[in-house]
Image: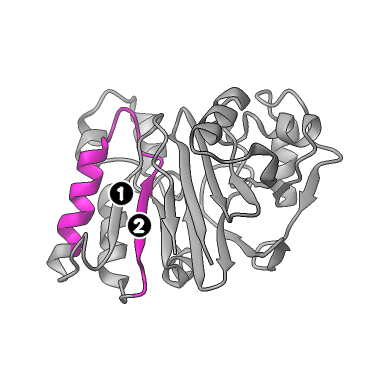
Amino acid sequence: MKLSFLSLASGSSGNCYYLGTPEFGILIDAGIGIRTIRKVLKDRSVDFDKIVAVLVTHDHADHIKTVGYLGEKLGIPVYSTAGVHRGINKSRYVEEKLYTSRRVIEKEEPFLIRDFRITAFEVPHDSTDNVGYHIEYGEHKFTIVTDVGHITDTVGKYICKANHLILEANYDEEMLRFGSYPAFLKERVASPTGHLSNREAAEFLATHYDGTLKNIWLCHLSRDNNHPELAYKTVDIRLFQEGIRVGKDVSLVALKRTTPSEMYELD
């Protein structure tokens, strides 16, 4: 059962991911413009008309910019919790509020979109509400955890279920500490409801790897406090210390902030 994954954008300027089969696909977050979404999908030979749903993780602007257009103008159902939906409809960044396209889900109550069995789960972040998603399709188990202040037992449980994982590695601790952010913003980023550092992501992955995880994509990298090579190196080194070899035991990719990834075909 073939599954395809594509990152259209991953960072504080906008987030959007595609997950699809040969018959249908979904978007996870839509924090970039509709023209960009259409262009990237077309460039990767994805038929936009096969998008059957949008999953939203939380109501911060870089994740919801285009959900109103997708939902109300194009009629694509938009799924998230009641709290996230309230945040979307209060947001000044969303021009079209969600009404007919609004689909309310509950945390840790699985639901179906075509052949995808999807479970939303609680993620700690300073938004109105915040979830990650675990998506099952045949033997594929796909988990996305972005904008996560720390890895709770619940978050850890769904990370460990995955054989394909998108995990936040937002900042390098030294770059944040000595960088230009004001003190209050540094505190917010590093707080338990802020973002996950390279080191924290690396430590969890290295100490919980059990051989079933095939693909790791590091997401939501900070523009000012991180860069892809550093995030990759931090995780690579920590995995190696536990005898886990990137490129042989597991694939590792640090996603670019504004540059679309290649299309990953997961067989």
Q: Is residue 236 above or below residue 138?
A: above
Q: With 211 as the anchor, is 240 left or right in this view?
A: left
Examine the image and state in which quarter residue 114 appears: bottom right
- Residue 80, percent from left and from top: 69, 50
Residue bearing the label numbered 1: 253
Q: Residue 72 sits in which quadrant?
A: top right
Residue beneath the point at 24% across and 27% down = 179
Secondary structure category for the residue under label 2: strand
Residue underneath mark 2:
216
Amino acid type for the residue under numbered disc 1: Val
Q: 177 left or right of 48?
A: left
CA separation in Å, label 1 and label 2: 6 Å
Q: Position of residue 105 (x, y in %)?
A: 73, 57
Residue farthest toward the right in the current orientation of the protein? 100
Residue at screen point 44% across, 60% down = 266
For label 2, count other residues whose C-alpha is less than 10 Å away and answer few (under 14), some (14-19) or many (20+).
Answer: many
Residue at 49% of width from left, 38% of height from top?
A: 44
In the rendered view of the protein, which quadrant contains the C terminus? bottom left
Element on which disc 1 rests: strand
